[in-house]
Image (tube, helix red, strand yellow):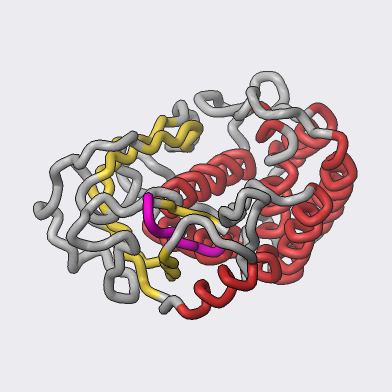
Amino acid sequence: MILATTDVRTRFVTQPDHAALSGRFAEAWGGDGFDPPTPRAAMRLAVHAHDDGWWPRDRRPQLGPDGTPRDFHELSPARWTRLYRRGIDEVARADPYAGLLVSLHGAGLRRQRYGLSPSWPDTPRAFRGFVEREGRRQRSLATALREDDDDDRLSVDDVALLTELRDAGRPPSGFGAGTDRDPRIWRNYRLLGALDALSLRICATPTHDPDVGDSGVGEPGIDDSDVDDSDGDESVGGDPIEVPHVPTEPGRPDAMLTATPLAGNAYRLDPYPFTTSPVSATVPVRTVEGTSFPDEETLFRRYYAADVEEMRVTLRHE
């Protein structure tokens, strides 16, 4: 569960709904200087569904010892690994390339994102079994993809990269962004991580426009044409969202994506990675009065008493 808390209320977004929002961003990705996600169908599946294993956990919000709702960080290693493994299982059954990518994403969260997040803990003991199992899964999926004469989505360089990530936790020397050897699976891994981070940070940010209300409710749906790109474009303060390691085009360095908060749930992106401006999408939210609760049963009742609303998110160019 992803929480956005003000002084008086708490907004909830489930992990699968946040992932679906990142998937809608993936559908619009590929503006000037940014390679469109390829292979298209598998990438969209991977981004949309990478957190689907969290449904059992997010059906019932939980409280911490201090009476405040737990967010997705506050989960035991055993429960976290079960949820992630279940989600990867489902995606891999639907498509082996998408499953391989989601497995990399999950295992990478416990391996410093294969060197992209060196300040993170490097495979805590409680997650070593999960990382090892996913390494075996990745090898099996990669072998099946390479042995399928009708499937050319995994290259020799992709396999070399996967082997080094599994064995050393880092890309091979000479591989990576800005080089001639930046395998597509590695670019896709970075893109999934960037879209995940952008959506997550947006879902965890309270609405900036007091006239809209804390839920930031908009009309359902996604549209990249019916939002006026000139209205409400003044920055409202607050910390910008920064997303590092955003892949651009093969052979070019990665970008740092900066999303500056505007009125409502709008953001100005620099550089701008989408095919059109603005891009607008919605994510289901529930907003509950209060930030702490006497017990989980009270939170449960208030959560399901709250209406599901569609929070509109708008991303625009300068």
**Residue at point 76%, 28% (across, down):** 122
Q: Main secondary structure of the magenta part?
A: strand
**Residue at point 56%, 40% (across, down):** 190
- Position of the N terminus by quadrant: bottom right
Whole-percent x and y of residue 170? Answer: 72, 27
| Quadrant assignment, res 225 | bottom left
| Quadrant assignment, res 61 | bottom right
- Position of the C terminus by quadrant: top left
Q: Is residue 180 visible?
A: yes
Viewer-side residue, 107 vs 276: 107
Q: Is residue 253 left or right of residue 163?
A: left
Whole-percent x and y of residue 255? Answer: 41, 31
Whole-percent x and y of residue 35? Answer: 43, 45
| Quadrant assignment, res 114 | top right
Q: Is residue 273 magenta?
A: no
Viewer-side residue, 266 vs 317: 266
**Residue at point 45%, 56% (across, down):** 26
Residue 20 to residue 273: above or below: below
Viewer-side residue, 311 vs 35: 311
**Residue at point 49%, 50% (across, down):** 200
Q: In this view, does 252 lie to the left or right of 143?
A: left
Q: What stretch is highlighted in magenta?
A: 7-14
